[in-house]
Image (cartoon, helix red, strand yellow):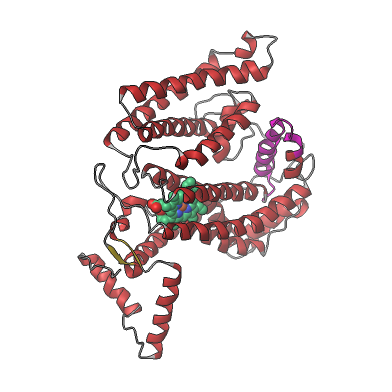
Amino acid sequence: MKPQKRQSSGISKCFHRIFQSIFPDPLIPKSEQERKRYLLKNLILHFRPATVPEKTLKFSLTWGLGGMAASLIILQFGTGLLLKFVYKPIPVAAYTSIQVLQNEVMFGQLIRNIHHWCANFLVLIVFLHMLRVFFTGAFHPPRQFNWIVGLGLFGLVLTANFTGYLLPYDQLAYWAVTVSTGVLEYIPGIGVLLQEMVRGGSDIGPATLSIFFAIHTAMVPFGLIILMSFHFWRTRKAGGLVIPRAPQEEIKEKPIRVPTLPNLLVREIVTAIVLLAFILVFAMVFNAPLESKANPGLSPNPTKAPWYFSGIQEMLMHFHPFFSLFIIPILMMIALLCLPYIDYESNTSGVWFGSFKGRKMALVAAITATIATPAGILADEYMIDLAAWMQGVPPSISNGLIPFMIILVGIIGFYVLIKRKYSATNNEAIQTLFVLFLVSFIILTVTGVWFRGIGMKFVLPF
Ligand code: HEM
């Protein structure tokens, strides 16, 4: 189909003119320079669709988050490659090689800082991208499988972060990984075996470092390249992004499309440059942490998991490990995987929060979680002691099954109540539950990061 012309503003005309001077239009290139530009334009169009729906260019649809995630991954590949020239993946040399990198290699500290902060921002940005996809209903057909691919990417980003965490081999790294892998043994049947596989033995040591290094520098990058290519291809096959629309507005069969060059590309480049500038300044101001060399005989107090696992570590404070580390995370994962395949009444793709009622219900869920989660944490901390009240009952029941069932009944009650009160559709009710879990998980994470002190006791952060 022939792309339709769009009314352009002053700024986009200006961008267009700059772009035209770099990639001129004539189909038959005249000079050598023109021929090169023509080839470059063609090359870009091998990776990007020739046209995109005009409305998807709106920044408030995507907030540039997917593109930012891709830019950060490219930056991680670049800085990671440079780090490999100096880093030594054996316990006796790993820590010293990081010190050498920071103190003796030109820009070594800066490159490490960029790699470190980028990794952390990446988790945050991918998480926000997932939320934007969810709240604009972009997981409905034909994009349902891309949601699954996205979850795979999220898993890889977390794996990259976690395996990278051990590499400096300082106290922080050693003990965070000890705690995080230590809990694997609670998985019934295969727990101990799994832990030994991950650690390469019963303790953290040379084999663990070598396994983490291989996963971090070979397997995860390979997986990311494959899944990212597939992710972009699926987005393209779906005809581009979801088209933003008002709650009652119909999905348009044939949206107005505009050429990718320069409309989308210029926006992507500008977003990437602003992001990279921000990361650079951040990395110049804040150094990546490096504590004293790992000492297997002396554990710091408190020993905390990396911040993105803090929510799970906080759950561990309230539930038996079998529930906090196994049952609840597995149920959450299954729920996320099944999300696009549930029978919905309508396809809300492109509508933020699905409907006006959906927005209102999401707000109710957010307020409920903001009150109930801290109340539950404090009650468990200072008032409730199920294990002491039910002496003789196995902890997996008194501290696991019973509190789990109480919370489950509460959640089901909330779901039924809200569905009836608002005569909600499936879409609205499921979104409400999602917000309830999301806000609770964020509060658990914040509590784990800032409100836990010596002996993991509840403390105020100031
Ligand atoms: C490494 C991680 C990821 C990268 C680099 C990435 C990249 C992108 C990019 C560039 C887009 C198109 C532009 C945009 O939406 O901003 C996109 C769209 C999409 N992503 Fe991701 N993504 C990642 C993770 C995820 C996750 C965790 C999910 C969900 C579980 C997800 C689901 C989707 C879906 C369904 C679309 C299509 C959205 C639409 O049509 O509006 N992605 N992704």
Q: Name the residue at 55% across, 55% down.
A: 113
Residue 268 screen position, x and y as percent: 38, 62
What secondary structure is the stretch in magenta mostly built from? helix
Compared across the picture, whether 438 is left or right of 312 comes to left
- The image shows residue 41 at horizontal and vertical percentages of 40, 76
Q: Name the quadrant of the N terminus.
A: bottom left
Residue 325 inside the magenta-drawn segment: no
Identity of the residue furthest to the right in this view: 201
Q: Is 142 displayed left or right of 302 in the figure?
A: left
Question: Would residue 256 appear left or right of 166 to someone viewing this image?
Answer: left
**The quadrant where residue 393 appears:** top right
Residue 355 in the figure: left or right of residue 322: left
Can you see residue 453? no
In the depicted view, which residue is nearer to us: 239 or 216?
239
Image location of residue 405, percent across then percent down: 55, 19
Can residue 433 be seen here? The reply is: yes
| Image height of 23 relative to 305, above or below | below
Where does the image place residue 146, in percent across and percent down from the top left? 47, 51
Q: Is residue 192 magenta?
A: yes
Residue 347 against residue 18 in the figure, above or below: above
Choose between 41 and 444: the one closer to the eye: 41
Position above or below: 322 against 116: above
Q: For the magenta stretch, what is the residue range?
A: 168-193
Which is nearer the eye, 318 or 2?
2
